[in-house]
Amino acid sequence: MNQRHDDITPGGGVFPRGEKNDAYARYFTGTSYLNALSTEGVGIANVTFEPGCRNFWHIHHKGGQILLVTAGRGWYQEWGQAARELHPGDVVNIPPETKHWHGAAHNSWFAHLAVAVPAEGAANEWLEPVSDQEYNRLKSGGA
């Protein structure tokens, strides 16, 4: 798949940002962008988050997900665990059935490749938003 690289994330990024993520906007707080890099065999997408954008809590049933951070600064959190700050080069392996969210820091663009781990019957379940109270604790250093 040939890609143009003239719409890179402000602040860097290896892959083009893609189009505004209207298809999944109802599962995000803030604005994100989506660029499907591969839909054959293994689904891989570049997901870019504007500062302060994050997705809702969600669960990948059956297959799980792998995040490969490519630009900016962001967060990943599993339910009941402390949030983990993410930087380019970080890898997050998300096992199936793990409730979690990920997104940008309040003052940084953030991009990652989202790799859908193939599995028969794999599906995503979108849950509640990450509250502003939960999210705002992160920008002040608490998690």
Image (cartoon, helix red, strand yellow):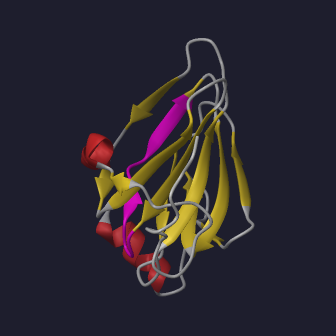
- At horizontal 47% and vertical 76% (from top left) the residue drawn is 105
Q: Where is residue 78 shown, x and y percent of the image? A: 58, 52
Q: Name the image quarter holding residue 87.
A: bottom right
Residue 130 visible from this viewpoint: no
In the displayed structure, would residue 134 be above or below residue 126?
below
Q: Is residue 55 magenta?
A: yes
Q: Where is residue 88 shown, x and y percent of the image? A: 68, 71
Total marks shown come to 0
- At horizontal 33% and vertical 71% (from top left) the residue drawn is 133
In the displayed structure, would residue 6 be above or below residue 34?
below
Q: Name the image quarter holding residue 43.
A: top right
- At horizontal 65% and vertical 18% (from top left) the residue drawn is 119
- Along the line of sight, the residue nearer the viewer: 97 or 18: 18
- At horizontal 42% and vertical 55% (from top left) the residue drawn is 18
- Position of 77 with respect to 126 (left or right) is right
- Along the line of sight, the residue nearer the viewer: 5 or 134: 5
Quarter that holds the C terminus:
bottom right
Q: Is residue 126 magenta?
A: no
Quarter that holds the N terminus:
top right
In the displayed structure, would residue 123 be above or below residue 84?
above
Magenta region: which residues? 50-60
Residue 59 visible from this viewpoint: yes
Q: Where is residue 118 shown, x and y percent of the image? A: 66, 24
- Along the line of sight, the residue nearer the viewer: 48 or 132: 48
